[in-house]
Amino acid sequence: MDKVNQIFSSLPEWSVALVVIISLFILMLIMKKFILLRVSKITARTSFFYDKLVVKVMSFPLTLCLLALTITLAEHTLQYFDIETEFKFFHATAQLLIVAALVLFIDGFLTGTVGHYADKTATLKNSSSIVQGITRAIILGLGLLIILGTMGIAITPIIASLGITSLAVALALQPTLTNFFSGVQLVIDKPIRVGDFIELDSGEQGFVEKIGWRTTWIRMLPNNFIIIPNSVLSQSKIINYYYPEKQLSVPVEVGVHYDSDLEHVERVTLEVARNILKTHKWGVPDYQTFVIFHTFDNSSINFTVMLRAKEYFNRFFIKSEFIKALHQRFKEENITIPYPIRAINYQQENPQSTVDDKSV
C-alpha cells in the first residue's frame, strides 16, 4: 500500500486527476451497458413498442449524458487537486452534450415511431421516407439553433439570414423542390400507393416500390426499375390496377357458328365460367358471371364472357384455363367455333376471261 501511495505521490497532480476522471467514465459506461442489457431483456417480453424503442434509441444519447456528467465531475476533481483551469469551458461543453443528447433522442424516437407505423397506415407507408426526412430536418435544425444559443451566439440574425438564404436556395433548387412538393402531392392525393401495380401513359407497367423525396421507383416485370421524377409522374396519366381494389373483370371474346342454338351456347358457357371461378385458385367464386351477344360477324356470332380475377396478373391464368375448358366443352356439346371464311369472286377479278367464256 505504501508503494502505491509513493507511486501516486510521485505523479503530477493533473495525471492523477486524469486517471480518476477516465476511470469514472469507464465505470459509468460499464454500468450503462449492464443496465440497458437488463432492461432490453425485460422489454423484449412485453407487447409494447415504445419501451423497446426508448431502449434502442437512448444508448448513444445516454453516453453523451454520461460524458457530460464526467466533465462536471472532472471540474470538481480539478478543484479538489487545486489545479487551475478555465471552468467555463467545462460548463459550456457539458451543456452542449446534454442538448445534443436530447436532440438525438427525440430524432431517433420520432423517426422510429414513423417507421413503426409506416406498415399500418397507408399514408405513412407511402411517405415514410418523406415524413422521416422532414421530421429529422426540423429536429436537427432546432437542435442546432439551441446549441448555438447555448454557446452564447445570437441566433436572431441567423434566423433572419435564413429567410434570405432560403429564398436563394429555393430559386437554385427549383427543380428539386418541384419534385419534392410533387411527391408530397402524390402522398396526400394517393393516386398511387406503395405496392400498387400501375401503367404509365408511356406504356410501362410495374409495382410502385418507393415514393421518395425527388423520384418514384417502379419495379417492372423483368425485375428492373423505372425511376421517374415526381413532377413528371404527377402530371402523367396513370392506370392504377390496384385501385380502388385489386379484383378486376376479365372479358373473353368468343364466336360460334350461325347455326348454333344461342340459348344452349349461353347455358354451356356460363356453366364452364362458373366452374372455373369456383375451382381456380385466383378466381372469384361469388362473382355473377354473364354472357353478352353483341356482333353478327362475317363467319360467326360473337359474344363476351365476363370473368373475375383476384388481381391484375391472375387474369392471364384465369383466361387461359377458361379458354381450354370452354374449347373442350364445346367439342362435347357439338358447338362449332367457325373458321373465318373468305369467298373469292373470280369473275369480278378477271372480267376478260368471263367475256371469252360467254363468247364460246
Image (cartoon, rainbow, N blue to C red):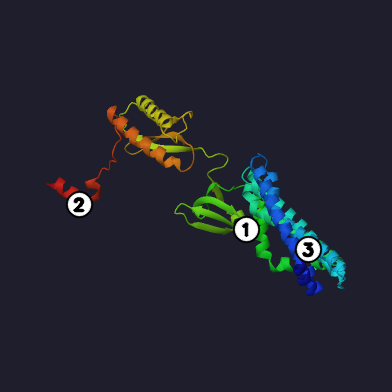
Residue beneath disc 2:
352
The disc label shown at residue 213, or none = none
The disc label shown at residue 144, or none = 3
Label 2 is placed on what type of residue? Gln
Q: Nearer the viewer, residue 64 or 247?
A: 64
Mark 2 and mark 1 residues within 8 Å of each other at the beta carbon: no
Disc 2 packing (10 Å; few <14; some 14–19; many ≥20):
few
Does 65 appear above or below 45? below
Label 1 is placed on what type of residue? Ser
239 on left or right of 124: left
Residue beneath disc 1:
231
Mark toward the start of the polypeptide (2 vs 1): 1
314 on left or right of 130: left
> Comparing marks 1 and 3, which lies closer to the viewer?
3
Q: Quadrant of residue 133?
A: bottom right
Q: Quadrant of residue 152?
A: bottom right
